[in-house]
């Protein structure tokens, strides 16, 4: 039995879909079940260090973590080594992170739901 080129290509496409692979150039949603994607479900830890302009740790800075959907803000005071830590931060939501002390403020960093790290480490430099 001789198969046409078209039949062979169709059989190959079905086999590739069944294996969970998608040929280059073809979106998975068009030719079979969707491919597995990473899911940021659960909680992460957001921690880091607050430093001054000369890169020395800052004790007593207030570090803020703002939930962008609810606008809720939680805070933490940096320890003598400049360290801060927020636990149980929802990985499925976006947050903003910044530090302040004595009228100085760091740049705002985004903790994105697209970031799959369970341990988010940040350095916040006061200006």
Image: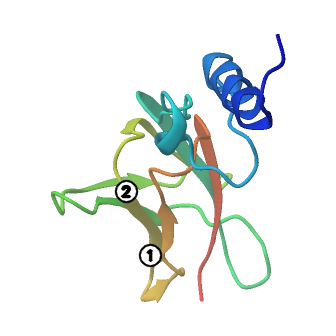
Which residue position is annotated with label 2?
94
Q: Quadrant of residue 117?
A: top right
Which residue is located at x 68 percent, y 17 percent?
19
Task: Estimate the x, y position of residue 63 in percent, counting from the top left.
Answer: 44, 62
Farthest residue, direction front: 1
Classify mark 2: helix, strand or loop: loop
Judging from the image, the colouring scheme is: rainbow
- Nearer-the-camera pick, 11 or 53: 11
Which residue is located at x 33 percent, y 55 percent?
75
Classify mark 1: helix, strand or loop: strand
Farthest residue, direction top: 1
Q: Cα distance, mark 1 to mark 2?
A: 20 Å
Q: Please state if 75 lies on the left or on the right of 9 as rendered.
A: left
- Numbered disc in front, either 1 or 2: 2
Which residue is located at x 48 percent, y 27 percent?
33
- Nearer-the-camera pick, 13 or 33: 13
Which residue position is annotated with label 1?
100
């Amino acid at each position: 039995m001789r198969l046409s080129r078209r039949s062979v290509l169709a059989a190959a496409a079905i086999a590739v879909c069944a294996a969970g692979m998608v040929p280059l150039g073809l979106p998975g949603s068009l030719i079979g079940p969707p491919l597995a994607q990473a899911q940021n479900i659960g909680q992460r830890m957001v921690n880091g260090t607050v430093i001054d302009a000369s890169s020395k740790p800052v004790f007593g800075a207030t570090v803020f973590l703002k939930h962008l959907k609810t606008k809720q803000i939680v805070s933490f005071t940096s320890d003598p080594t400049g360290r801060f830590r927020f636990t149980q931060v929802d990985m499925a939501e976006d947050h903003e992170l910044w530090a302040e002390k004595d009228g100085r403020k760091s740049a705002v960093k985004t903790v994105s739901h697209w970031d799959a790290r369970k341990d988010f480490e940040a350095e916040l430099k006061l200006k």
